[in-house]
Amino acid sequence: MSVARRCSEFLVSRFPLEKLSYEHLANKTVPVHKASWIYLLGGLTGFAFLVQVVTGILLMLYYQPTVIGAYDSVRYIVQYVPGGSLIRNMHVWSSSAMVVFLFIHAITNAFARAYRKPRELTWVTGALSMFVVLGLAFSGYLLPWNNLAVYATKVGLQIAEMSTLFLPGPLGGIGGQMAALLTGPDGIGQETLNRFYTLHIWILPALLIALVSVHLLLVQIHGMSVPRFAETSHKQEKFFFNFALKDLSAWMIFLTLLVILAVVLPYDYLQPYTLLKRYSPLAAAPSGIKPEWYFYFLYYPLEVLPKVVVILGTMIFFAGVVAAPWLMEYVPRMWGKRGEESKFPIVATCVVALVIVALTLFGQNIVDVMRGTSAP
Ligand code: HEM
């Protein structure tokens, strides 16, 4: 059978659009078992994104995307606009919450093996949306135009530049061209801010909405999967309105905690003042520049291992995450086992989760141990 025919048959079988009826939606059910809470995480991720959109639009009423005005406009929002500090801190904390929900959503679905047929494309659209979320976080970091924002972005752009250097011929220059496209012709400055702002408020949100729409369409078509341990129990509950009310309760609890956090712990309190000072191209770079915590899994290995190894490893890892539905089936066949009966998917998920959590929580300590220096 030709590749084109196989692809079209695959797509037709994964998008049985006849299931998109009103009856199907109204009678939607959710499996009931001891890990049913995992079905709340996708909704929580989506709700955190909604908080981002609403607070982001409110911030746009005052934020000025210019190298002269950005820093002062953020200060003005926080100090003088009624409710401005609350909105800004909700936006920043909710971005972290969204990454946490996304990570737990992906890991729990990997443990539940929810990527298996017919949900391969649900997984792939989810995995792609994860990269867009990281892009949103990276592009948003520059917008306050303080020392931390600009120097951390410089480091990110250097990584992008190096990311393809090991590829042969003209392919090696792709990373450099990408970084140049993001920076603009005059080095880090107004053009860079324009481009990051456009990415942050238009391009990436639009891409995320498109991907998540297909993701949710597929969830609706295929229904929720049941993890292996609960396959014998056939207990289900109605989505409308039993599970929908649980979703709503989880969102309200999250919103309450977010407001409390935004009021009692303004994000800027966690950073040293020198890093939050207005960026000046003439001043020396302050020490202590780091990316946001969700990039530590990449940042700390870059500190101690050869860059090419880390960048290549990260690219292979990301490709592996997207292709997980097929890898988890075909890799066990090397040991003569079917994906269903192999421990490989669970072991691989544990290793990935542990490495990411360890680098995020203890990255600095790991670097110190490897360098033989003591932690500050
Ligand atoms: C902005 C990003 C995302 C949003 C808004 C989102 C939303 C959702 C929602 C609402 C569900 C149904 C309820 C649930 O299982 O929690 C779901 C299911 C699912 N998601 Fe996501 N998701 C996102 C990202 C991801 C990522 C990063 C992955 C994996 C790499 C993923 C994989 C899946 C899978 C496999 C299912 C089906 C679960 C099942 O059938 O049991 N999603 N998602």
Image (cartoon, rainbow, N blue to C red):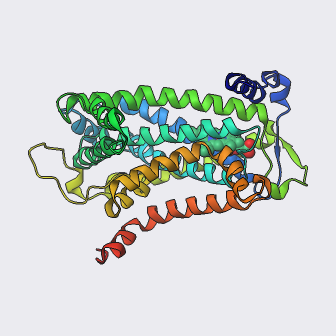
Residue 373 vertical position relative to residue 99 in the rendered view, above or below = below
The residue located at (36%, 29%) in the rendering is 60
Q: Is residue 195 left or right of residue 280?
A: right
Residue 238 vertical position relative to residue 190 in the rendered view, above or below = below
Q: Is residue 246 left or right of residue 274?
A: right
Residue 291 percent coordinates (x, y): 34, 52
Residue found at the far left of this picture: 282
Residue 76 percent coordinates (x, y): 26, 38
Q: Nearer the viewer, residue 349 or 153?
A: 349
Report which quarter residue 244 is drawn in: top right
Q: Quadrant of the C terminus?
A: bottom left
Residue 171 vertical position relative to residue 292 in the rendered view, above or below = above
| Figure quadrant, ligand 1 | top right
Q: Nearer the viewer, residue 3 or 126?
A: 3
Q: Quadrant of the N terminus?
A: top right
Residue 306 percent coordinates (x, y): 33, 59
The residue located at (78%, 28%) in the rendering is 13
Q: Nearer the viewer, residue 309 or 127?
A: 309
The residue located at (41%, 29%) in the rendering is 201
Q: Is residue 47 in view from this perspective? A: no
Q: Is residue 69 left or right of residue 212?
A: left
Residue 110 percent coordinates (x, y): 67, 52
Q: Is residue 241 in view from this perspective? A: yes
Q: Nearer the viewer, residue 16 or 343?
A: 343
